[in-house]
Image (cartoon, rainbow, N blue to C red):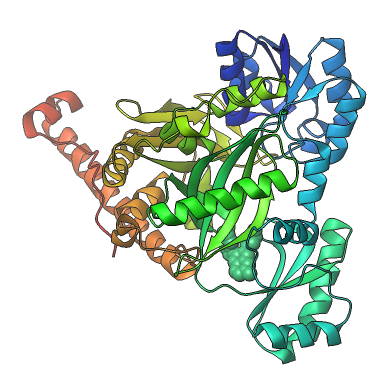
């Protein structure tokens, strides 16, 4: 096993990895920028080192500085978390050169899956269904038009080096092709320094379902079932669950075995995720592979009982996967809500500032993975994710009740969060029924939620005003008043939204 692990990340995921290190008896090392001097991860780690100015390029993305530090302090491995260096093949190669273990896959797997056309070729060869379309870059408008006719409109033009929703364009008819082709190529060149684009058939109203896989260095592979990730807004996931209420046993067998094939196809080791689109008829298509631990990994941990970060560390140290596929079964249902410092009434712009008051929920079936606490600053420099609230119970319906309860307990004072909007989403009857696809949180739906939220806020203000008026009138203390009249301002159950 390792003696000391440097965590090349910040916030909730750095805290998550530090916790695994502590439980494994491995020394943990945090790094921090100017903005993060007193952040939770720097306080929880066994050692913490200043790495540079607040902009990520000068701190969390300063490759040479991080590797030099790791050598100086005798770290034998680096955990990248997600984002930053987690899917950076050059970083992994640099670690290989410096004899530091990367807690993640090989640079080769990362590179292979970084090219969407290469990944599509590989999947086809290995019996993993891909979205109908090309596995080569489109060379000309003429060629693209011909292929699009064959596939049938609408089609999607995608950047080969893209992913996660960047560098995509829907084309509904032949007249749009030329200008879409040229602008997608231009954008791809700017964003990814590679202007290859390819064509896929546009899948209508799909769900986004992903499978957690795991490999070790001895060629063993397991899957840890699927996660439902359709509840997203503008490619930002907001609510994830495991298992998906849309996936039946037969479909689960097929999609998880496809995911294992995908992992084997690139000789994958450590934790990885295969993303699929699933249409209304439960046909599924490989989309991309995420060669990292994902934000939403806790829902999988809660339904399988496997500590994925512990397993990542163990496998990176050369151990076999610590369990067999046959030992795994789905136990209950887990939901995750991402708590963002965002202002719903201001177009979800990040809400920066200091967290003045922080009281996380707890109690049965509740897990909070947070990178922040009272006194922490949310700055413009990094992602506005404050924490993840994960709820588990025997069944989906009760997990939703539990999530609503936990969201209502959650106090984050000093800045604006999306908690009120999360409550409205999970109170929605279609969400409750599991009746949704990737378009669920469209702009129209969101503006309805925002106006409901504004109405709720007004009601809250009226109630608070009434209480203060009553206090002034009676000249009694708030406690007395509450006791006497039964006034209680925390009405946890929000109104339903159809
Ligand atoms: C698609 C698609 C429909 N048809 N491909 C968006 C992110 C990137 N990973 C792939 N994406 C999509 N690819 C075909 N052929 C719809 C999306 C898509 C999407 C996918 C997953 C989760 C959220 C999404 C939101 C908008 C579009």
Residue 208 in the image: x percent, y percent? 53, 58
Say which residue appears at 80% left-offset and 40% top-offset.
88
Between 88 and 340, the one nearer to me in the picture: 88
Residue 183: x percent and y percent?
Answer: 81, 75
Residue 162 location (% of width, % of height):
76, 59
Asked whether 237 or 226 is in front, the reply is 226
440 vs 465, left or right, is: right
| Location of residue 298 with respect to 98 vertically, above or below | below
Quarter of the figure that contains the C terminus: bottom left
Question: To which quarter of the image does residue 313 belong?
Answer: top right
Judge whether 210 appears above or below 62 on screen: below
Displayed quadrant of residue 179: bottom right
Asked whether residue 134 is in view, the answer is: yes
Residue drawn at 49 percent across, 24 percent down: 374
Residues 361 and 461: in front is: 361
Ligand 1 image position (quadrant): bottom right
């Amino acid at each position: 096993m390792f003696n000391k692990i440097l965590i090349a990340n910040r916030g909730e995921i750095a805290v998550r990895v530090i916790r695994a290190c502590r439980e494994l008896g491995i020394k943990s090392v945090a790094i921090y920028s100017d903005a993060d001097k007193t952040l939770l991860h720097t306080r929880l780690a066994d050692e913490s080192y200043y790495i540079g100015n607040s902009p990520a390029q000068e701190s969390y993305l300063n490759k040479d500085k991080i590797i030099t530090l790791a050598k100086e302090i005798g770290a034998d491995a680096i955990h990248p978390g997600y984002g930053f260096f987690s899917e950076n093949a050059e970083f992994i190669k640099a670690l290989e050169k410096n004899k530091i273990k990367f807690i993640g896959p090989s640079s080769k797997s990362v590179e292979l899956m970084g090219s969407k056309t290469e990944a599509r070729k590989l999947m086809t060869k290995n019996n993993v269904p891909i979205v109908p379309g090309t596995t080569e870059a489109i060379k000309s408008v003429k060629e693209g038009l011909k292929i699009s006719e064959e596939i049938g409109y609408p089609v999607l033009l995608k950047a080969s080096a893209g992913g996660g929703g960047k560098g995509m364009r829907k084309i509904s008819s032949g007249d749009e092709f030329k200008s879409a082709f040229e602008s997608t190529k231009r954008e791809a060149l700017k964003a990814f320094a590679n202007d290859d684009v390819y064509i896929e058939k546009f899948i209508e109203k799909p769900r986004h379902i992903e499978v957690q896989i795991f490999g070790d260095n001895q060629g063993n592979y397991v899957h840890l079932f699927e996660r439902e990730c359709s509840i997203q807004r503008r490619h930002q996931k907001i609510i994830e669950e495991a298992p998906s209420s849309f996936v039946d046993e037969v479909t689960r067998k097929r999609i998880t075995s496809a995911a294992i094939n995908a992992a084997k196809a690139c000789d994958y080791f450590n934790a990885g995720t295969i993303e699929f689109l699933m249409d209304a008829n439960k046909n599924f298509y490989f989309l991309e592979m995420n060669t990292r631990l994902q934000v939403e990994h806790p829902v999988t941990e809660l339904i399988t009982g496997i500590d994925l970060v512990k397993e990542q560390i163990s496998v990176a140290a050369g151990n076999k996967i610590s369990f067999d596929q046959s030992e795994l079964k789905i136990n209950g249902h887990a939901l995750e809500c991402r708590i963002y410092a965002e202002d719903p009434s201001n177009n979800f712009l990040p809400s920066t500032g200091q967290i003045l008051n922080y009281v996380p929920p707890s109690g049965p079936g509740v897990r909070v993975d947070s990178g922040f606490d009272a006194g922490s600053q949310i700055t413009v420099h990094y992602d506005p994710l404050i924490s993840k609230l994960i709820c588990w119970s025997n069944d989906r319906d009760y997990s939703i009740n539990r999530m609503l309860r936990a969201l209502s307990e959650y106090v984050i004072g000093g800045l604006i969060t999306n908690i009120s909007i999360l409550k409205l989403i999970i109170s929605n009857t279609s969400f409750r029924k599991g009746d949704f696809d990737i378009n669920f949180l469209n702009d129209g739906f969101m503006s309805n939620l925002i106006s409901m939220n504004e109405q709720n806020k007004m009601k809250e203000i009226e109630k608070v005003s009434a209480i203060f008026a009553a206090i002034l009138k009676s000249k009694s203390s708030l406690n007395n008043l509450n006791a006497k009249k039964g006034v209680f301002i925390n009405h946890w159950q929000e109104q339903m939204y159809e």
